[in-house]
Amino acid sequence: MTRPPRPRPEHALPAGAAGEDLAAAGLRRAGYRIAGRNVRTKVGEIDLLVRRGRCWIAVEVKSRTGHPAPERTVRGEQLDRLAGALRALAPRLRPRPRELWIDAVSVRWLASGPEILHFPALRHVTWEADGIGGCGRRPAPRDRRPNKLPSDPVPAATPTMPVLSDQIMPRRKLLLILSETILFSAVVLIGTSLPPLTTRPYPFFAPNVDLLRGLLTSFTVAAICQASLSYNDLYDWKSSQNRAELPNRLLHAAGYALVMLGVLSMAAGSLFFLPGLADINRETWKLILLVGIAFGGVYLLRNAFHWFFFKWRFGERIVVVGSSTEAQQIAYMVMESPMSGFELLGIVEEPGQPPLPQGAGHPRVLGTLDQLRALCRDEGISRVVVALRERRGKVPVDRLLDVRMAGVLVEERETMYERLAGKLAVESMRPSYLIYGRGFAKSRLTTVSKRALDVAAAASGLVLSLPLSLLAALLIKLTSRGPVFFCQERTGEDGAPFKLIKFRTMCVDAEKESGPVWAQKNDVRVTPIGRFLRLSRVDEIPQFLNILAGQMSFVGPRPERPHFVEQLKQSVPFYPLRHTVKPGLTGWAQVRHPYGASIEDAQEKLRYDLYYIKNMSLLFDVSIMLRTISVILRGSGAR
């Protein structure tokens, strides 16, 4: 019944065959089964024969470059031939068809890449079933003109979605954390269970309740030590890559860990239990010794870890295509982000552009676009990042299709930027990236779970912070005249205004003469107690009431004043998009960027805010809340 696709040379991909490849991939992802390609009958040829259930469809693929609407080239006589071919095939199709239809798929080559549109149900085909499926004669065919049909877009291939987990916890970072958790736990548990430190010989491999308690204690010690490592930025690659500074940071981390362990052992020493020690409270020095040994092991592990991954290049190999400034920027970002798991091979220049800088510190120039396919094959390239200087009418579609059909992933520069930086490239982003890209999904489950987290976190925060709030209110009242609380109009979801509540940290009528201005570093309008409240974030506690009232969420873009919103709408592209969700007490921008007090800072924060809105999820919210605790403890980003 069907015949396989006609063979084609490895290095030559005809435009028609390329269009059929894209159409077939798109239909397959839309839930159709591809039964045959280029199916020939005595009446005519069917480009793609597909089915969904017992509905069989003949698909006419129209692939054009520069044509505004390739689907309009489908003529009535072509539909007649397709209908005849489908009728001829019907008795031999299995499963037996209940319906026969003719669809069209339009492949239009744009400057930004191929656009694939699916036009379903151009014609319903009737036939004499002759007992096939007991269908009988169908109603008279209804001819639908292609230009009158609503188009149903079908992507040829699902765009590569930046993995959110790589921002929450990159895979290499997760592997490092797990390795160090095992190291700390093993050193503590095994070290106290074997001579010479053990005072109660214990077979730590024998499973029982004592072993379980020992494991929990060991994991607790490991968690405290790793919290100290995180506090000293030893899980941040940019801070920890300096091997000369690594011992110094590890020494500080060990000191913090021992202090925390000492405080915890005094406050709840009975919770600590190690099966190899008869009395852990009298043998604390052994635990201190083992923690010190474990930190020495961390130093060796870090060096071995970096050598293993970066010396032997276990990363995914990529090339950047383009001679633009953005191409060089994304290349430098890959080179400076080894934890991302990508290894930059170099840059492929685009024709007709000035040569790129070469030499030490610059990405290697690999050649031209004509060599891209051979380069991907010979060097084991698995991803091509496109960052062209000139896009309009100059996208090398044939070259990119050639490598894509060879199994190499092809993605835009904006996608890689988003993956590496955890933000969107607003300044160079086209609206089509937001319109056609994945993300920005606001399912009912996400909305309900987010609201439940907001209510639980805000209610718990109000109860737990009540003593601190009473103390803050008393100090404000005693040290400056004026009200305890400060209410200010802010812009909320969908641009709706609301009153944000905070503890007052400035003198009364601080903007009476100046009008609305950004908060500055060492702002003279801030009271002495207000400076402490801002640094410790205690002034934000009353916003729990805004969260319970439904005006804010715990996590989201920070609400801005309407005066500044109007300014930023005029100068920052896509700024109104941040108002499509509820503003937050904390947010992705707050944990990734310092305090913003200018239009440039607002644009930078918008990049993070849009990334959050695009990837909004309960797990992402929890990750941001945990990072916020670290930011508060460090006292960073406050004015």
Image: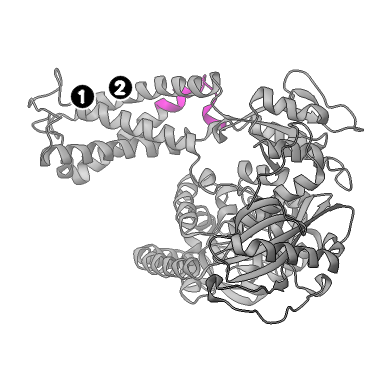
Residue 175 picture location, percent across and down:
43, 34
Instruction: Please give left or right for residue 91 compared with residue 512 in the image.
Output: left
- Look at label 1 and name its amino acid: Gly
Q: Which residue is mark 2?
A: 293
The quadrant in which residue 496 appears is bottom right
Magenta region, mostly helix, strand or loop?
helix
The quadrant in which residue 510 appears is bottom right
- CA–CA distance in space, label 1 to label 2: 10 Å
Above or below, 611 against 319 in this view is below
> Which residue occupies the foreground of this view, 485 or 80?
80
The residue located at (48%, 38%) in the rendering is 171
Residue 145 picture location, percent across and down:
82, 73
On residue 206, which mark appears?
none
Residue 23 picture location, percent across and down:
71, 53
Q: Which residue is mark 1?
A: 191
Q: Which residues are magenta?
A: 238-251
> Does residue 218 appear anywhere in the picture?
yes
Above or below, 512 against 534 in this view is below
Ranked by sequence position, the earlier of labels 1 and 2 is 1
> Which residue occupies the foreground of this view, 278 or 70?
70
- Look at label 2 and name its amino acid: Ile
Regarding mark 2 in the picture, which secondary structure is present there?
helix
Q: Are marks 1 and 2 in contact (CB under 8 Å)?
A: yes
Query: Residue at the front extreme?
Result: 130
Viewer-side label of 1, 2: 1
> Which residue occupies the foreground of this view, 279 or 302?
302
Regarding mark 1 in the picture, which secondary structure is present there?
helix
Residue 585 picture location, percent across and down:
52, 63
Query: Residue at the bottom extreme?
Result: 139
